[in-house]
Image (tube, coloured by chain):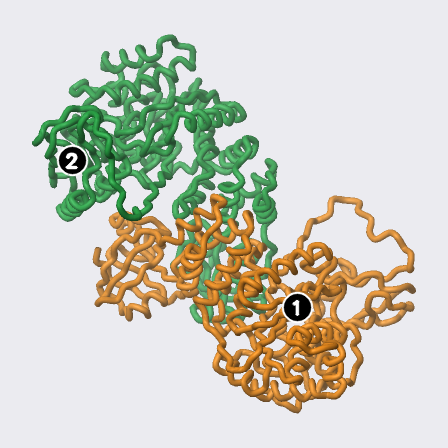
Chain colours: A orange, B green
């Protein structure tokens, strides 16, 4: 059937979508979400159909930007439209829906079609749901990683060996990467670190790093920085290392499920050429992984998947029941990391965690006593110098000082009304408050803790300070805390009562999608 | 946040959708597919968010037609926009994704949100996929039916008792309903029949009936017809008997899965007040249900689900390995049904099937020897008179004769090149050919068979005739048959070889969504 093009001012997020009048759709024998082949002057593309009763007149075909630009359409140009069978990958998705496991080729077909916009949200959702329900075998996970790498960009460094670290996330205030990368690079090793922005948290490592340097680099800019300095801290989102994964995340978020955690992480490591990897698994109430048993199972999967992919992976199970360091929020955290490396402040848990992870990496490549080697790199100031080199290579100011980093000017401090010790800090509530204050969007927003778990508290002692860039956000967060209580529990050392439940509680489940 | 309305000329198929600029979305802390509350002058609605980088400017909010009209928006009107938590039904969907069964209240929440446009396609897909994978308990199926009825329109007739029939479909040429309804109504019983249009088949009962009378009635028009004549044959799609199901079908079609078959059918029966029901389960290769064992399992589910819903259901397992009667295609089938009732043509399988089903219904309400009672209603001509009454009540011409029904004027007959008997008719291939000819959209398109399974064939005998309204569709169908072979197999009585498979065959699976 010949239809006249009507380019729409709509984008489909990389998918191929056209809009047909219902009359023409019926004539072609296609329904909403069926597919049609479009051809014009030898150029061909398959698009997913949306139908409308009035938005597009019969005889016309509405084209989203992707289709318009690929076929070079102008309004009124006649294109040839014929029905198209669904892609083969839908057969594979249906196999998985029936509980069968998929082979390498089938998985490649699916990932290729996801990455190239050939599958609708409905079809991708069915795939993710089936992975969530039936789980993935190790072979499926490896094939998924490999297919994601094959359909994306690769870093391809000349340096060897390549080291990398990853945290599965879930603990607020975790600025460890800002310490580990300069330590490792300062000792002559290569660590091309990509990081994500916050999705459900108060700050991702890319958000933190952005408070002191540009992080939205292209892959060739990243390559240049790493070849020069040995390290980098770059936002992974613009690099297209695993484009299929960016599409999966958009579907996993509303469903709050994440069956692709492992293959996605490992795909991105593989794409930068990592050979030695340490995965940090923060564990405890208020993180993703609640118990050490669970953490061990996950660690086993990482190590086994790594070995299939040619990555020597180790895992580091860390304490996650309270924030790392004293700050939560992009600028506050960047400042704290810089204070640690400048040795202007002592932040014992952050330093210990960073030296443990850097140390494991160093030992992976044959060094002995990695922990103390890492500690010495901080104490001798070479880690700080390396960070300044990286900041400069990424286009930032290498002479930046902690006090140059802008923190929100609206602030408010909560003080304790009682004497006791800090019994707990509720990570999830703290993150909610930080987000109400404006984090991660408002870089200067966040929370500074003055006490941590086990610290003694006197009446009138400062517990924490809220920072916001906007007054109304500060007011909102204060109101929230006044209504729902603080996220820090102070009590007598042996107090047993945590909470009285006297009516049916509202069930609120925190889902942390950050990888 | 205050944003200025920008009404879009887009419809969302009953869902509440708004488009935000990415900057405003970030400021609000919402992502694509999150939800926002909109309020204007005391009117409130929750909408699903789409984001764009340029289609809507910052400070504005694009509103789909549903939102525009509900809030009465004009361009530039300021509305209040705040983030909204996901609806509770998403928690329930996630429970089902984890394999837990859902209680009545949870199912009602989900169906309510589906019917009211509160869930995105991603969320509904996850629900359907989980039902497909884990299956439904009988209690869940009943709760689904009841929730669909509760969120839709009801017929509420004064007449009692109310009888109904249903075919799960899958066999081409099945015009049985056009015979059963007038038989049952002619004997003084009430049968308010709703039917569907073809989705993947060559004709649905609504398509067939439409060749002789209007079928797109409103629910009050339908009520009037039934109160007057005792029967009707009406398209169910415009009645909103189970609006959630219309949304489910749009998701099931591209995935080619149908976990809601039973609850959907039963919901629509319940909504018309059916108390006695006969379900036809066509069985055999080339239908939905391949074996008698399978058919029995399905029958058991229908009967048990019926008893939970207060419907006395019986099932009738029928032979489905070839079309019913000699014709496939809306007008051809309507003509054949009219010929049978006028006794101008003898169509033994159609008459037998209709009398069996009508007979079972009559026996359900206490009559004896239902089969012969039904047969007599045809032979005495009272079924034909009743059909003419119904045609008139629905707004058609009561004096219509078989030859008044327009059949496509482009035709072509295939003849046998060999001597033998008809060994098989491939239902799926036949349906493909009928659809290539233009059915169900071109009502006059279709196939007439001259031989059926077991008939003796001489070289030169007519096997089947193709009818189309458009020459190019006829040409296409002829080419298809010439390339892929006919859908009728003629061979010697004891020939054993069906097909030689000498290379990897293309796996083509036929999915029949018709309910």
User: At x 69% / y 85%, what residue is drawn?
Assistant: A383
Residue B189 versus residue A184: which sits nearer the camera?
A: A184
Q: Are marks 1 and 2 in contact (CB under 8 Å)?
A: no
Residue B446 versus residue A243: which sits nearer the camera?
A: A243
Q: Position of residue B334 (x, y in %)?
A: 23, 29
User: At x 15% / y 27%, what residue is drawn?
Assistant: B420
Q: From what the image shows, is residue A224 above or below residue A144?
A: below
Q: Quadrant of the N terminus of chain A?
A: bottom left
Is residue A397 among what the camera can see? yes
Q: Position of residue B74 (x, y in %)?
A: 45, 61
Q: Position of residue A87 (x, y in %)?
A: 35, 54
Q: Position of residue B454 (x, y in %)?
A: 21, 24
Q: Residue reaching furthest left?
A: B460
Would you identify the image quadrant in which residue A365 lies?
Answer: bottom right
Q: Residues within 10 Å of mark 2 (few under 14, many from 20)?
A: many
Q: Residue reaching furthest bottom?
A: A399
Q: Disc 2 designates what residue?
A: B407
Q: Disc 1 designates what residue?
A: A202
């Amino acid at each position: 059937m010949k239809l006249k093009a009507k380019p729409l001012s709509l984008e489909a997020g990389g998918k191929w979508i056209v809009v047909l009048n219902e009359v023409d759709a019926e004539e072609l024998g296609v329904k909403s979400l069926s597919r049609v082949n479009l051809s014009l002057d030898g150029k061909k593309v398959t698009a997913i159909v949306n139908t409308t009763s009035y938005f597009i007149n019969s005889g016309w075909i509405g084209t989203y930007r992707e289709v318009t630009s690929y076929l070079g359409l102008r309004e009124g140009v006649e294109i040839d439209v014929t029905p198209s069978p669904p892609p083969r990958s839908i057969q594979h998705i249906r196999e998985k829906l029936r509980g069968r496991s998929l082979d390498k080729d089938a998985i490649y077909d699916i990932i290729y079609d996801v990455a190239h916009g050939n599958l609708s949200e409905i079809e991708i959702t069915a795939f993710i749901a089936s992975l969530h329900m039936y789980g993935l075998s190790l072979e499926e996970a490896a094939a998924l990683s490999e297919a994601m790498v094959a359909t994306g960009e690769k870093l391809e460094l000349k340096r060897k060996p390549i080291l990398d670290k990853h945290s599965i996330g879930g603990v607020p205030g975790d600025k460890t990467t800002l310490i580990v990368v300069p330590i490792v690079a300062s000792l002559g090793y290569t660590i091309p670190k990509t990081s994500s922005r916050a999705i459900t948290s108060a700050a991702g490592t890319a958000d933190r790093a952005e408070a002191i340097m540009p992080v939205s680099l292209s892959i060739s800019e990243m390559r240049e920085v790493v070849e020069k300095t040995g390290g980098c801290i770059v936002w992974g989102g613009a690099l297209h290392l695993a484009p299929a994964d960016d599409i999966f995340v958009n579907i996993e978020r509303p469903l709050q499920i994440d069956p692709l955690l492992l293959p996605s992480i490992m795909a991105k490591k593989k794409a930068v050429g990592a050979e030695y990897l340490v995965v940090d698994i923060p564990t405890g109430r208020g993180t993703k992984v609640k118990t050490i048993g669970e953490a061990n199972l996950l660690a086993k999967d990482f190590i086994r998947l790594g070995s299939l992919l040619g990555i020597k992976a180790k895992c580091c199970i860390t304490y996650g029941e309270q924030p790392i360091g004293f700050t939560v929020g992009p600028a506050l955290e960047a400042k704290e990391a810089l204070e640690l490396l400048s040795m202007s402040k002592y932040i014992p848990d952050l330093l210990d965690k960073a030296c443990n992870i850097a140390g494991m990496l160093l030992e992976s490549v044959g060094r002995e006593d990695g922990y103390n080697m890492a500690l010495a790199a901080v104490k001798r100031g070479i880690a700080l110098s390396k960070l300044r080199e990286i900041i400069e290579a990424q286009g930032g100011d290498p002479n930046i000082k902690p006090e140059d980093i802008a923190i929100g000017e609206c602030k408010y401090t909560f003080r304790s009304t009682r004497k006791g010790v800090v019994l707990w800090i509720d990570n999830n509530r703290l993150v909610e408050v930080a987000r109400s204050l404006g984090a991660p969007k408002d870089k200067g927003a966040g929370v500074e803790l003055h006490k941590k778990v086990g610290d003694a508290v006197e009446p009138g002692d400062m517990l924490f300070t809220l920072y916001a860039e906007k007054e109304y956000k500060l007011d909102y967060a204060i109101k929230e805390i006044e209504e729902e209580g603080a996220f820090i529990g102070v009590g007598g050392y042996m107090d047993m009562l945590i909470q009285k439940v006297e009516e049916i509680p509202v069930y609120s489940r925190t889902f942390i999608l950050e990888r």
